[in-house]
Image (tube, rainbow, N blue to C red):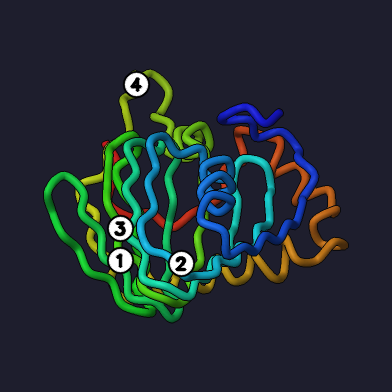
Amino acid sequence: MRQEGDVRCHPIVSHHFSSRRPDVVHHYLTEAYGTQGMRIRGGGYRLSHHRINAGSFRMDRVAQSGDLRIDVEQLDSVVVCQSTSSMVSRVSDGELRPFRPGDVFLNAHPGRPYRIRWRRGEVLLVQLDAGLLHQVVSPALGRRPAPIRFTDLQSASPVLAEHWRSTARYVRHAVLGNPEASRQPLFSARRRAPSRRPRWPSFPTPH
């Protein structure tokens, strides 16, 4: 069983799921993302989910054919979303944010409830364990660690969004999608050693 924050070498696993049954989709997504109190409204759709699981982070390609409204009471991990062909709107802490194809954004503040309306189309998701995020932004020697908090949840700037898309595309295809590359000692060491931190693009500054 994967433990939160476990960054030891983890075999890369690819998995595909597809269903038209709302109850099966609900169960699958709850298990896949560790959501608490998730409700999905909207019928007559098919959801397709392809995941590359690298242990402390997962990269997903998710598409659905309906008009879904999803309520989530709590999700403790961080999910970076990139819409490729779907209109998405999110309400978190009473604030409504619309997102268009091409936008890159965080799903919500970790641990906070949120609501999403997701129109038909595809999104790309990267789910990061809280332990990995704390590792990346750990304080300098002599400073006490503090909880991570994001300043806001607006979409990334065009420059930052393009940087994220390029980075995610490289990791997905050139590294995780290439068995030879993923078995290289340098890549395995970077996934095992806490002192060698992956340089994820920073969204709102944590403090």
Left or right of residue 117: residue 187: right
Give the CA separation, mark 4 to mark 1. 29 Å
Instruction: Report the quarter where the C terminus lies.
Output: top left
Q: Which residue is mark 2?
A: 164
Q: Is residue 23 above or below residue 68?
A: above
Given contact means CB atoms under 8 Å apart, are the residues at marks 1 and 2 in contact? yes
Q: Residue furthest left?
A: 94
Left or right of residue 43: residue 52: right
Q: Which residue is mark 3?
A: 116
**Can residue 137 be seen in this snapshot?**
yes
Left or right of residue 206: residue 139: right
**Residue found 73% across the figure and 57% down from its top:** 15
Q: Are there few (<14), some (14-19), or many (20+) residues within 10 Å of tag 2?
A: many
Per the image, label 3 sits on a secondary structure element best described as strand
Q: Which residue is mark 4?
A: 143
Nearest to the eye among marks 3 and 4: give it.
3
- Residue type for callout 3: Ile
Instruction: Indicate which disc, 3 or 4, sits on the residue closer to the N terminus.
Output: 3
Given contact means CB atoms under 8 Å apart, are the residues at marks 4 and 1 in contact? no
Nearer to me, 83 or 37: 37
Per the image, label 1 sits on a secondary structure element best described as loop
Give the CA separation, mark 2 to mark 3. 22 Å
Nearest to the eye among marks 3 and 1: give it.
3
Instruction: Indicate which disc, 3 or 1, sits on the residue closer to the N terminus.
Output: 3
Instruction: Indicate which disc, 1 or 2, sits on the residue closer to the N terminus.
Output: 1
Instruction: Identify the disc placed on residue 156.
Output: 1
Give the CA separation, mark 1 to mark 2. 9 Å
